[in-house]
Amino acid sequence: MRIGPYAVTLEERTSLPAGYSVLTAVAAIVLALGLASVLFRSPEASLPDAYRAMFTYAFANPHGLSATGQRAIFLLFCTYAFLVPLRAGLWNIGLPGQVYAGGLAAFAVPALLGVAHAVPSGPAALPIVAGMVLAAAAAGALVGGAAGFLRARLAVNEILVTMMLNSVLFWLVAYMIKEGGPFMSATGEGESFRLPAGLQGPTVAGMPFTAGVAVAAAVLLDVLFAKTALGYRIRALGENPLAARYGGILPVALSLFVFAVGGAFAGLAGYHYFAAVPGVYKIPGNYGYYGDLAFYGVISALIARRSALGAVPIAVLFAGLSLGARFAQGLLRLPFGVDYALLGLLMMTFVASHVVLHFRLAWRRARPTPGGRVPADAAEG
Amino acid sequence: MSVPTAAATTVLGAYGITKRYPGVLALDGVDFEVACGEIHALLGQNGAGKTTLMKILFGLLEPDEGELTLHRRAVRFRSPHDALAAGIGMVHQTRRLVMAHSALENIVLGHPRQRGLLNLRAARQEVEALCARYGLPLDLGARVWQLSEGERQWVEILKALYRGARILILDEPTSVLTPPEVQTLLAGLQALARQEGVTVILVTHKLPIVTAASDRVTVLRAGRVAARLRTSEATEAALVQAMVGREVALRASRGDAAAGPPVLRVEDLAASNDKGLPALRGVSFVLRAGEVLGIAGVTGNGQDELAEVLAGLRPATAGRIYLAERDITRASPLERWQMGMGYIPADRTAVASIAAFTLVENTALTYHFDDAYVRRGLLDDAGLDALTQEIIATFNVRTPHRRARAHHLSGGNLQKLILGRVLSRRPRLLLAHLPTQGLDVEAAAFVRSALLEAKAEGAAVLLISEDLDEILALSDRVAPIYEGRLAGVLTRSEADPATVGAMMAGLRR
């Protein structure tokens, strides 16, 4: 394109300026909030009030902040569940099914031990809690691993398999918790029994221990992919399966592995929400909502791309804004669905920011002085 | 007919052509003229700007500066459509034909007159007339997949002529042809030029083609015209010097063969291609330490399958492979690397490297399983970095930085990196499949001498190549491959170009 004496082209950046990724992320957030201002206009309150209500609830109000933290942990586990297979080039798009499987397995442990209504407490309960965590991770791994196995061995599309497993697991949960199901509550309200106090996820300073697990997992995952031979093999498989095979990497075993690990994280997400969030400690009748929420893990993984630690602020932001927007909606009688609309806008501006981050507009005078060297490959193109 | 003087009969001219890509000046004030009825060779290494210039002449690219003239009138090609309308036809290096259609259907495809209803009968008469005029025995009713590469190329040439092209641009037209097919092509092009006054632009980096067929030659180097000569006045040495800017030894010198113990023994090996059809039909040979066995053949005679089966990337349907007397027929690629096999695949970008990885990460591709570079599951980043640095220095890889991504490397530099990575493992068996394909003269010479060095150090080298000159220059023994079978194994003294060429073409056993 030509503008005046300049030729303008879109070029890929060869190197990223320092701090540029943070800058574009902030710009994406500001832009999304700016676009959302159309939706936040209300006769009840001014725009600054609406935004103030949203942010105050999400990040300053003690209740809101706690809810933001719980939701961020959930989103983070979902993010890892998608991120690990993604590094191997596989799409664990149906992670809600693995989330349900994790929740079911966690509740199966006390149900099978017959301690669901009796109340073990104190140190005696800790092995059972540990068993619940492991069972949740194992169940998620099993469901994810099934998709990984079908993908690796029979080349069945992993996206279809996981989506179908979502339905299977959704209805399995329904069967288990509704009236007459093995996990039904004593009062039969279409939800599961409530975990006795001793089996509820331990908390530290008001936050469930799963917060520590989530942050530790982020560090471990980043180390795995940056430093280890295993992480290298997964990345190689994701970037170029042919080259990976050439280099002696076994695609079948790795595909199974990444799906099992991804599934285990989704299982932990299920454990976290149903067995460790203060005030919940049951599989509620609206469990499907948390399955839908799991998709925001997919989005935050896609935005964070390579880094699990990089996903932490994104998960916190998504958690906070979704809760804050819902709160502001109720308080100020904003249109229904502004929370989802805001998340959708954020998603789009983040994706757009990737383009800004990796490409740049080059302005050149249309007739510069000739000169310069010709590297071999580009000139041939 | 004498060589026409350019000034009087220039049909197509390009003056002061400059083309920039991001960070690259591909063409820098290039002047190029072709005369009516001449065969004009455009010679240059990879990256010299040949392809860019050709794309500009055919309207695929627009120059940033400079102008094109046709019959000395300024023209502007916004797309190939404009170029075709102006009588310029192009035959690409890779065929652009519909395999399931007949030759005739391909020729009329896209012709302005065939928009609505096909009138194949009239078209057949016209095309047959064209064939008769140029003495082409082409079966117009045959499906393209049934035709040889040489015949397919003629289909494309006829397609251009049928559309009324008076200027033909051929990009590396001989790259996939057997020696007899090359002869037919060049004779046919000469007839077109001499008798019909068609102008032919031959884009190539093969010197024998230039000297055998062209009237004039323009040599490009680094985006500028390095020489403009009458072919009759040019020597091979002078052309090479113009291409590379300095003198280069044309032939690598072979060391003497010291026949060592057998390293690779292949017995009656068979394999299928991707479509499940037999592609390798019973291949047997023995390869010894310190020798180069050259598998000579034209594309698609089972070379891909042979290389992949030996590397463990494709299952054998029958037969056995022994590496140092150990049966590795079912061994995984990983086990083969660990047992001392080194493999240089034909496809540098799709198989042998990972574009998005840095050079150091690409080095790790054949070291991630090596205890010397993995400690307690952690990759030894410093060690790999040093190893990469060593490969870059030893193999003269030109790169901004070893943490640069592989897709920033040119083909030649990428190949040198891959070669260095494979040789750094000191393999006892080296499989080199098309190791110099698409490389410029200098890089190709470097790769060849590296292969000979590996051989001198005792490696058994299996060289699979479609470049007969390369096979003859490097091999101690030559095995032409034809339709999935070795047509024989010749000693170097038995292997003269005519014999090997004939065996490659299936003419003799």
Image (cartoon, coloured by chain):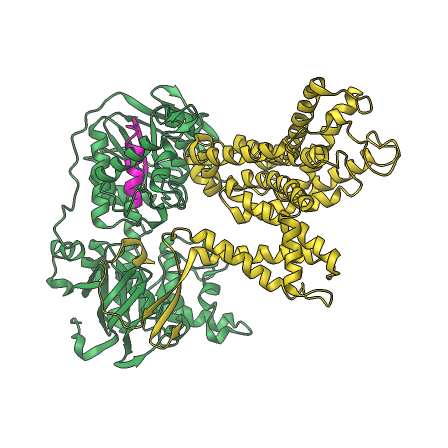
Q: In this view, does A50 lie above or below A6?
A: above
| Residue depicted at 75% across the width and 29% down the height | A107
Which residue is more in the foreground, B504 or B25? B25
Q: Furthest residue to the bottom?
A: B73
Residues drawn in magenta: B414-432
Quadrant for the C terminus of chain A, please.
bottom left
Which residue is more in the foreground, B191 or A44? A44
Q: Residue B105 appears at what percent x and percent y? A: 48, 64
Magenta-span inclusion, residue A123: no
Q: In this view, does B498 lie to the left or right of A284?
A: left
Dividing the picture into quarters, in which one does residue B375 lie?
Answer: top left
Q: In this view, does A296 lie to the left or right of B113?
A: right
| Residue depicted at 53% across the width and 55% down the height | A351
Q: The green chain is which one?
A: B
Q: In this view, does B57 lie above or below A261?
A: below
Dividing the picture into quarters, in which one does residue B163 lie?
Answer: bottom left
Asked if one can make out residue B142 in the rendered structure from this viewpoint, the answer is no
Q: Which chain is yellow?
A: A
Q: Residue B411 appears at what percent x and percent y? A: 31, 48
Q: Residue B299 appears at what percent x and percent y? A: 37, 46
Dividing the picture into quarters, in which one does residue A194 lie?
Answer: top right
Magenta-span inclusion, residue B430: yes
| Residue depicted at 55% across the width and 31% down the height | A257
